[in-house]
Amino acid sequence: IILVITGLGYLAYLNSSMILAEIISKKTMTPVSIKDVIWEKDSFTIGDIMIANPKPARLPTAMRVKSIKVDAPYKQYLENPILINQIHLDRQTSPPLPY
């Protein structure tokens, strides 16, 4: 049984970008794409995330960011409310839109 749990954990780790995109997509009710997720001690980095706007919006993309680094011990995600120490967004992957 330990081998099965380890195997499932490894599959979740390999597919973490797809799983996280699906979770965010369900919460925002919009398409979400994530290139990769890098796991580190007490933090993770989401690479190349794009969140689409809902259908009636004029612009197709709500947010596009090169990377998002979230600093928080992993045990915090099991608590309510979740306490996140810092979130760092690294500029857009495409040129800013003219306003």
Image (cartoon, rainbow, N blue to C red):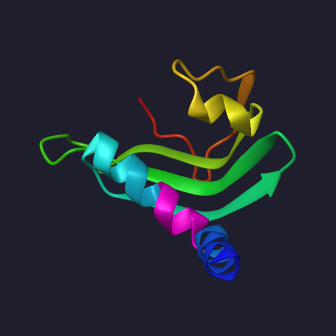
Residue at 28%, 50% (x, y): give it.
30
- Residue furthest right as drawn: 41
Horizontal side of 29 relative to 96 (left or right) equals: left
User: In this picture, is 85 found above or below 50?
Assistant: above
Q: Quadrant of the N terminus?
A: bottom right
User: In this picture, is 96 found above or below 26?
Assistant: above
Horizontal side of 86 relative to 30 (left or right) equals: right
User: In this picture, is 11 found above or below 75?
Assistant: below
In reply to whether residue 88 is colored magenta, the answer given is no
Q: Nearer the viewer, residue 20 or 69?
A: 20
Residue at 63%, 72% (x, y): give it.
5
Q: Nearer the viewer, residue 84 or 1?
A: 1
Q: Nearer the viewer, residue 15 or 46?
A: 15
Residue at 57%, 72% (x, y): give it.
15
- From the image, give the main secondary structure of the stretch colored magenta: helix
In reply to whether residue 18 is colored magenta, the answer given is yes
Residue 69: percent from left, percent from top? 73, 40
Horizontal side of 17 relative to 46 (left or right) equals: left
Residue 7: percent from left, percent from top? 65, 80
- Residue furthest front as drawn: 1
Q: Which residues are magenta?
A: 15-20
Label total for image = 0
Residue at 58%, 23% (x, y): give it.
82
Q: Quadrant of the C terminus?
A: top left
Residue 95: percent from left, percent from top? 58, 48
